[in-house]
Amino acid sequence: MMGLVIPLSLEPWRIVNDGVMGGISSSRMAKADAGLRFTGELSLENNGGFASVRRMVEEDLSDTGGVLLEVRGDGRSYQFRIRQSGRFDGVAWRANFDTSSEWRTVELPYADFRPVFRGRSVPQAGPVVPATIRQIGFLLADKQPGPFELEIRRIEFLPTSENSLD
């Protein structure tokens, strides 16, 4: 059973780096042969240390149980993030995934996502509620300064009936 595939177009992605708090990390989202490429330079200067990109989600994700990503990267650990609000700031639910130079399929059931606010755990926020997902994104905050690159070939929200997510 197919899930809901998110189109890999450039227009809806918005860059949010540590410059919002004085940092100097940089990033961009660009078209790539296989889909999209999230690249940049992570800096720990000026209390920085994160680079991210996010987009609004208009689709109804009520009957989904998690997300499947096809990614290739630089060996670093990234976060896939979900927000249940359209606001710029607030609680995000994050799940980590590792990358390698080979394409990988990563399944992230909603149960693997943890609510955070500015890097701190917010357990009282509860679990992901699929019907209220309004934003998705990628974030790098592994405390390793230097260039990074993550290629994204697929973002698919899987139906709750998928056995692998039960």
Image (tube, rainbow, N blue to C red):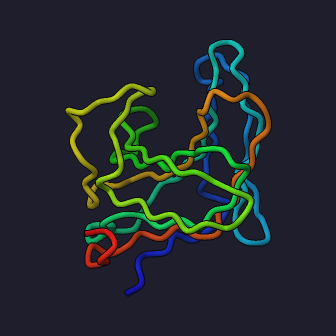
Is 9 placed above or below 14 here? below
Instruction: Give left or right: position of 155 versus 30.
Output: left
Q: Residue at x 59, y 24 (%)?
A: 20
Please provide percent x and percent y for residue 74. Answer: 73, 50
Is 97 placed above or below 18 here? below
Q: Quadrant of the C terminus?
A: bottom left
Q: Quadrant of residue 72?
A: bottom right
Please provide percent x and percent y for residue 50. Answer: 61, 31
Q: Residue at x 50, y 50 (%)?
A: 80
| 91, 108: nearer the viewer | 108
| 130, 58: nearer the viewer | 130
Total marks placed: 0
Instruction: Give left or right: position of 147 versus 57.
Output: right
Q: Residue at x 20, y 32 (%)?
A: 124
Q: Quadrant of residue 63?
A: bottom left
Is 157 placed above or below 44 here? below
Instruction: Give left or right: position of 31 versus 138.
Output: right
Q: Quadrant of the N terminus?
A: bottom left
Please provide percent x and percent y for residue 146. Answer: 78, 32
